[in-house]
Image: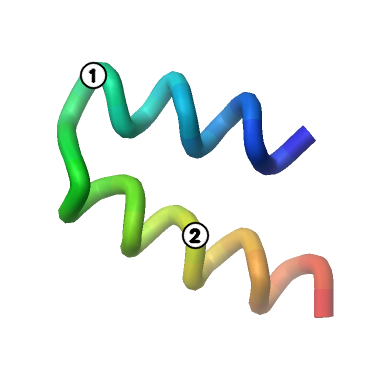
Amino acid sequence: LHEVILGTTGRKQGTSAKGTLFRSTESSLC
């Protein structure tokens, strides 16, 4: 699920947003 979110965010905002969201997602999962 997080892969889809990352892909969508990456397309809309870019690598920076993708990296930030990735960290937030990892924290939530862990």
Residue at (53, 66) in percent of width and height: 24
Lateral position of residue 6 relative to residue 3, left or right: left
Lateral position of residue 8 relative to residue 11, left or right: right
Say whether disc 1 or disc 2 marks the residue closer to the N-terminus.
1
Lateral position of residue 14 relative to residue 3, left or right: left
Q: Quadrant of the N terminus?
A: top right
Placement of 8 over or under 16, stated as above or below = above
Residue 25 locus on image (x, y percent): 62, 60
Placement of 2 over or under 30, stated as above or below = above
Label 1–label 2 contact, CB within 8 A: no
Amino acid carrying mark 2 in the image: Phe
Reading the image, the residue beneath label 2 is: 22
Choose between 6 and 27: the one closer to the eye: 6
Residue 8 locus on image (x, y percent): 44, 20
Residue at (37, 29) in percent of width and height: 9
Placement of 18 over or under 30, stated as above or below = above
Residue 28 locus on image (x, y percent): 73, 69
Reading the image, the residue beneath label 1 is: 12
Kindly report the distance in space between the C-alpha atoms of the residues bearing marks 1 and 2: 15 Å
Residue at (28, 20) in percent of width and height: 11
Placement of 10 over or under 30, stated as above or below = above
Amino acid carrying mark 1 in the image: Lys
